[in-house]
Amino acid sequence: MNKLVCIDAGHGGYDSGAVGNGIKEKDVVLKVVKRIGRLLGDRGISIMYTRISDIYVGLKERCQIANSLNADLFVSVHINSAASEQASGTETLCYNKNRLAEFIQKHLLSKLKLKDRGIKERKDLAVLNGTLMTAVLCELAFLSNKAEAEFIKTEKFIDLAAEAIVCGICEYFGMEETHKNKNTEDLEMKKNIDVIINGEKGCTGGYFADGKNLFTADFIRQLGFRVTYNPETKEVSFKGKVCADSVK
Ligand SMILES: [Zn+2]
């Protein structure tokens, strides 16, 4: 019954994604994804990231990560951009229309309150056609649009986007949205744990409970980090540098 969601922050490292109006897509989506991870962990849903820092991960590798862990869902987060400053709104992309796309798009619209660009089938996107599970790619808003760019820069935007995606995932799993921190915090199920990655504090959920036998840790190790676990502070630390080979 334990669910595993692979959350994918688009771009990273030398690939900034869309850039404009003082925003880099890769930075915003990483913030949103980390927030999603924390919220899902609070609800007892295990999570797996394709990246948790500013590194480039290949599109094929993103799919492999999700496939090899047999994730139940794959959610990729992006920010849109267009040549026309007028372009605006939220859209959710999927290989075949699915309920996850429907729920996430619905919650994104109700929280972000931007224009509904709809749910679009895209057969050509690597992370949608290379993943074996139900997968979606959310284009939250347009950073090329001045008004939306101002919104994207706010903490409110990060919060609302993450909450919306989490609501969509919970609805897909048939979980009540009221499963909030309050009830789950005391349960043994609580899986969130602080992580320190090259000195930067973050948070993840799922597999760090005992510091051993960790899918996520294995993945991080593959990226060239040394993973250590401190049972007293319950902190997992990653040290080291990403090997160029392993992120190809
Ligand atoms: Zn993108």
Image (tube, helix red, strand yellow):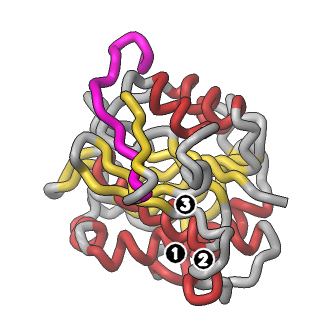
Image quadrant occupied by the C terminus: top left
Q: Is residue 217 visible?
A: yes
- 238 vs 140: above or below: above
Nearest the camera: 34 or 58?
Answer: 34
Labels 2 and 1 touching (C-beta < 8 A): yes
Residue annotated with mark 2: 107
Residue annotated with mark 3: 91
Callout 2 crowding tier (Cα within 10 Å): few <14, some 14–19, many ≥20: many
Q: Which mark is residue 195?
A: none
Nearest the camera: 176 or 191?
Answer: 191
What whole-number distance in Å separates the C-alpha atoms at marks 3 and 1?
A: 16 Å
Q: Nearer the viewer, mark 3 or mark 1?
A: 1
Whether disc 3's CB lies below 8 Å from ligand 1 is answered no
- 160 vs 241: above or below: below
Query: What kind of residue is marked 2?
Result: His
Labels 2 and 3 touching (C-beta < 8 A): no
- 150 vs 235: above or below: below
Question: Image check: 89 left or right of 45?
Answer: left
Residue annotated with mark 1: 163
- Whether the magenta-drawn stretch holds residue 239 is answered as yes
Query: What kind of residue is marked 1?
Result: Glu
Mark 1 or mark 3, which is nearer the start of the sequence? 3
User: What segment is highlighted magenta in the picture?
Assistant: 234-248
Residue 137 coordinates in the image, percent (x, y): 58, 50
Mark 3 or mark 2, which is nearer the start of the sequence? 3
Residue 81 coordinates in the image, percent (x, y): 35, 50
Question: Image check: 234 left or right of 179?
Answer: left
Q: Secondary structure at mark 3?
A: strand
Most distant residue in the left direction: 22
